[in-house]
Image (cartoon, rainbow, N blue to C red):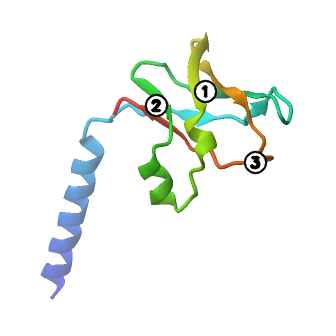
Amino acid sequence: MRKKQFGMQYIYCLLLTAYCLLPAVPANALSIGAIEVKSSFNESFQAEIPVYADGQSGLEISIGSKNDYAKLGIERTDIVDSLSLNVEPFDKDKIIIKLSSAKPINQPSFNLIIKATQNG
């Protein structure tokens, strides 16, 4: 019985050592700041959202698709379809998402999903 316990401990130590020796995959941090609405009620919608990323290589930002809204169980109103999104670099680790609409928005609130992926 003692030999079995020693054998299992040896295997666990061996697996832990092998895991520690695996090459580390670099991780990039990505965070989205608070939305700042620049327009007033009954005006064309204008808003900015800061995005902080460790490098901007491979960064893709978009408004959530109908499928994204459905996955989260959130209603996607027609207002979302009227929004356009532009991404503007601010500095090496920060970009600004600019959201706008061509027509005034007459709703006090709506659900907005911003989808951000980096390197796949």
| Residue position marked by numbered label 2 in the rendering | 28
Q: Is residue 73 visible?
A: yes
- Name the residue located 13 percent from the left edge and 80 percent from the top edge: 3
Quadrant for the C terminus, please: top left
Real-space Cα distance between discs 2 and 3?
Answer: 32 Å
The numbered mark, 2 or 1, whose residue comes first in the sequence reads: 2
Closest to the observer, 102 or 110: 102
110 on left or right of 113: right
Q: Residue furthest bottom?
A: 1
In front: mark 3 or mark 1? 3
Residue 84 x/y as whole percent: 58, 26
Closest to the observer, 10 or 52: 52
Amino acid type of the residue that numbered disc 3 sits on in the rendered structure: Ser
Please rate how many residues cluster around mark 3, counting C-alpha atoms within 10 Å: few if below 14, some from 14 to 19, many from 20. Answer: few
- Name the residue located 68 percent from the left edge and 34 percent from the top edge: 33
Real-space Cα distance between discs 3 and 1?
Answer: 25 Å
Residue 25 x/y as whole percent: 33, 34
The picture quadrant where one finds residue 41 is top right
67 on left or right of 78: left
Label 1, secondary structure: give it: strand
Question: Which mark, by number, is residue 109?
Answer: 3
Question: Which mark, by number, is residue 16?
Answer: none
The picture quadrant where one finds residue 95 is top right
| Residue position marked by numbered label 1 in the rendering | 52
